[in-house]
Image (cartoon, helix red, strand yellow):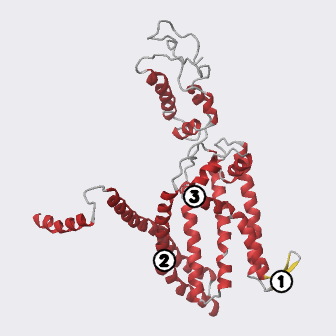
Amino acid sequence: EGYTQTRSLYAGHYLDYVVTPIYKIICANMKSNTDHVNKRNYDDFNEFFWSRECLQYRYSTGDPNERTDLEGGSGITTPLPGESQLPITVGMLNAPKTFLEKRSWLRGIMAMSRLVEWHIVTFYLLSVLAFSHDLVWGWVYTLQVASGVFWLFNSLAICWGLLEVWSSYPGIHLPATSIFGSIFVLVARFLILVYQTLYLMWTFGPSKGSYLGIEADSTFWWWQYVWLSLLCMTPYFLEALTNLCPAITTKLYTSRNDYIQTFLNILFPISRLYVGKEVHESLKHTTVYVFFWATLIAWKLCFSYVFEVYSMVLPTIELTDDYANFPDQSFIKMSLLLLLRWLPQFIVYCIDMTIWYSVWQAFAGTSVGFSEHLGDIRSMKDIRNSFGRAPEHFCSK
């Protein structure tokens, strides 16, 4: 008791019986001539290594001479702890195909779904603000129109869920909890979307009306829409809270409470992964990141509102005014003209974020360089000296 058995192995043993067998299996699969639907690649083996099944195997393959201690007087005849398990190569050979990348442009949209969603939602809100200014809407009506953003959030969430189903089915093996969670979320969001649509329609309907056997004004239906929308916005609020205080993320992900884990498995499937659960930043660093992104987003929204959104309000009003007041005007033609005018603006709106991010990144990098004394230019004096030497170098050439 208290004595640990050790074994002296030759140099290169780890390479021969750990690295090489794994490499041979991966190499054989990568050289296979079968289509990517049936060929296991790096992503499949990587997902296997982060699964629970991988823990049932030992990392080393069998070595017939492994039980002989090269330095000791007698060999060790009993297996060390874990050596009774099958080697990892057996698990890799039996590992199923779990990662299937369907070749489509939809994969790119799915990968950038959060960026796409953010740009669509903020562009809509800026458009509502711009139209409310020129059309002189009251704050109540403006708020009701802006609340349509909840409908957008839910619609986009359903789109991303359907894309996930498209990307996973039928080639990827999923556990029952993942399948049930996806179906439950999609069905629940679709039912909420139906009622959201009805409540929003009745909000902008007659001031007095009877729907579903209930006689109420438009304000009543708008509040029903708001309360229902807050229900499907709960995951967004929780995610925003965990981003502002990352320590909460670690606490939730590492919690052993069955109810919390069930909630995470259904609404946040990524929480089932082993990685990324205890790598949160400190609150001090998080504050710096929030300041960086808050100032960047505020400037981007202000710039885009003035030069990309508000500038389109008057042409849009004039086009719709011509359609409403002049006879024999085509609705399809008007819609096409509006699409041709707004689409380039929206594309620029999506692209210019990268430009402002580069500018903010340059300022942040300069600030960090000054504070950490990195590089050749470490102060304002160095900057002035460099600019002063620039004409000399230019003239010397």
Tell me the distance, in whole angstroms, between the alpha carbons under discs 1 and 3: 45 Å
Q: Tag 2: Cα neighbours inside 10 Å, few (<14), some, or many (≥20)? A: few
The residue where tag 2 is placed is 302
| Identity of the residue furthest to the top in this view | 73
Amino acid type at circle 2 is Cys
From the top left corner, tell me how far across and down residue 23 is, in percent: 47, 29
Residue that appears at 42% across and 68% down: 356
Q: State which mark lies toward you, 2 or 1.
A: 2
In this rendered view, identify the residue nearer to me: 388 or 283: 283
Secondary structure beneath disc 1? strand
Q: Tag 3: Cα neighbours inside 10 Å, few (<14), some, or many (≥20)? A: some
Which numbered marker is on residue 245? 3
Which quadrant does the N terminus fall into? top right
From the top left corner, tell me how far across and down residue 377 is, in percent: 26, 60
In this rendered view, identify the residue nearer to me: 80 or 93: 80
From the top left corner, tell me how far across and down residue 278 is, in percent: 56, 46
Amino acid type at circle 3 is Cys
Amino acid type at circle 1 is Gly
208 with respect to 90 (left or right): right
| Identity of the residue furthest to the left in this view | 396
Nearest to N terminus: mark 2 or mark 3: 3
The residue where tag 1 is placed is 209
Secondary structure beneath disc 3? loop
Tell me the distance, in whole angstroms, between the alpha carbons under discs 2 and 3: 27 Å
Nearest to N terminus: mark 1 or mark 3: 1
Q: State which mark lies toward you, 1 or 3.
A: 3
Nearest to N terminus: mark 2 or mark 1: 1
